[in-house]
Amino acid sequence: MYLGKYLYLPTHLSSLYLSLFLSYLVAHTKYSKKSVKMARIDMLVKLFMGFVYVNVILGYVESSYSGVTGYHVAIRRMALFKAAHIIRNGAPQPQSYSSPLVVSRSRVLHVTDYGADPTGRLDSTEALEQAISDAFGSPVDAHLMEGIADLGGTEIHLDGGTYKISRPLRLPKTSGGNFMIHGGSLHASDNFPTDRHLIELWPSSASLSYEYITLKDLMINSNFRGGGISIINSLRTIIDNCYISHFTTNGILIQDGHETYIRNSFIGQHINIGGDHREKDFSGIGINIMGNDNAVTDVVIFSASIGVMVSGQANVLTGVHCYNKATALGGTGIYVKAPGLTQTRIMNCYFDFTGIVAEDPVQLHITGSFFLGNAFVLIKSLAGVVCGVNIVDNMFSGDYTGVEIVQLEQSNVPFTNIDQVIVDRNNVRGMVLKSTVARGSVSSNGTTWTVDFSRVLLFPNLIKNVQYTLHAGATFPNHVLRNISKNCVTVESNVPVSATLHVSVDQSMVGYI
């Protein structure tokens, strides 16, 4: 009998030890007094059962080496002994526990178990829909927002496959949250509807139905038929590490709802690394934000007519790299289309030959970003309003063809409501610096000195604050500020003098009472 790597017990010794043990057990049971506690007998029985079990296993191992088939004989012997013990002492009582034994199943649902084809040759729509339906059918005894069932972290695992679908994967009408789809690729079939998205969080009512839904590690190919992902009226949705391509409408659509976070993702209509001969024909929107309080972080948009469209408030974009379509070809990196109440922050982004457009911005912050290839910021007038705008601490690089870093589009109506607009501290190479704050000096011998700020100031004919110093050496003439029209500052003295005029101007001085 084989007892492990280093010990071999012959079969006849095993049988001998078993016989001696049985003899001891019988003798002890037969001659002990009746006052001996049943617990002692039970202990001996359990000891014997353990010995028999070890003997059976060892016998089985021995048979596997020696060819002897004594396994079933040993099992039968153990079963007979167990039956005799039950007849004599009765069946053992079941143990009680403080909490019942719960048999649970995994909340990770693998779509291949539902018949989905991971090769992408066959249509897997129904299989994926069934998996999603099952996921929403097993909520835990908890809730997120009122009326939204907690699915307990249920996951739809795509098992690294590519799945062809012919209609959108729309979450069930029943509410749910704490749920994830991840780990594979989705490909739209040739008959996929052109006005839909491959994954849709689209409640059947106006109320919030989905919360804390995560879409992660996905590659989505829209096959030039519609869009990639739509998030409608949903709460706290996460899109992480996704690659979305070949869309014609939106790579990602966010409509209403609250707090959708998009991060670490790549989005493009056509797969390229720039310089694509089809660039003039790029269409669609990479990310279309039509809601409030959303965040886009560390995302690359490499082909689309518009990289990010923002038409809601309190959104933040950080670390976004746009080379979707050059401004010279009609493209826009980030289009802020929330006139009158913008409340958008754009920080540490990279605009690669494509820039920013903002319509009547009110509270817009652009900072720490890099504008390459004559990319610039365009402020577009619809009702002539621009208030609370900061364009500060950015870098601009161009080709020395005279492109201004910040431009005004006033073809509809000129800007008349201008307040708290600060364009300052930007460094420029190969482009024309524009600012709302400027400083200048001029020296001459006479009675008037004029500093022309029209080339640097952003708004024409607008100076709200002037500070100047007339440095005249040993002479002390009387002098006065005469004119600030057309962004030129003129100072006049009462007598001719050789002097230098130093001037600082501000187009948006904030008044304090």
Image (tube, grey):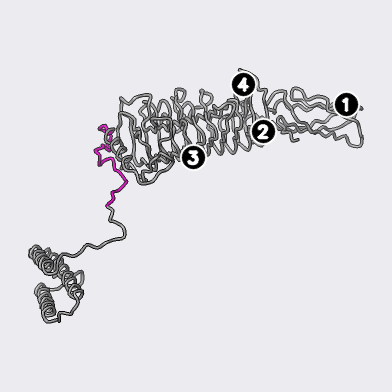
Among all residues in the image, which is located at the extreme top? Answer: 412
Q: Residue at x 78, y 31 (%)?
A: 466
Asked whether the residues under the numbered discs 4 and 1 touch, taking CB atoms below 8 Å apart as contact, a structural biologist would say no
Q: Residues within 10 Å of mark 3 (few under 14, many from 20)?
A: some
The type of residue carrying mark 2 is Ile
Where residue 76 appears, as percent x and y from the top left, is 8, 64
Decide which of tag 2 and tag 4 comes sooner along the chain. Answer: 4
At numbered mark 3, what does the secondary structure look like: helix, strand or loop?
strand
Q: Residues within 10 Å of mark 4 (few under 14, many from 20)?
A: some
Q: Nearer the viewer, residue 233 or 447?
A: 233
Mark 1, residue position: 447
Q: Is residue 401 visible?
A: yes
Mark 4, residue position: 383
Q: Nearer the viewer, residue 329 or 47?
A: 47
At numbered mark 4, what does the secondary structure look like: helix, strand or loop?
loop
Q: In front: mark 4 or mark 3?
A: 4
| Picture disc at residue 422 | 2
Mark 3, residue position: 298
Quote the CA–CA distance across marks 2 and 3.
26 Å
Where residue 232 appears, as percent x and y from the top left, is 43, 31
Decide which of tag 2 and tag 3 comes sooner along the chain. Answer: 3
At numbered mark 2, what does the secondary structure look like: helix, strand or loop?
strand
Give the quarter of the image for residue 63: bottom left
Q: How many marks?
A: 4
The type of residue carrying mark 1 is Thr
Q: Residue at x 92, y 34 (%)?
A: 475
Q: Assess whether residue 94 is covered by the magenta stretch.
A: no
Decide which of tag 1 and tag 3 comes sooner along the chain. Answer: 3
At numbered mark 1, what does the secondary structure look like: helix, strand or loop?
strand
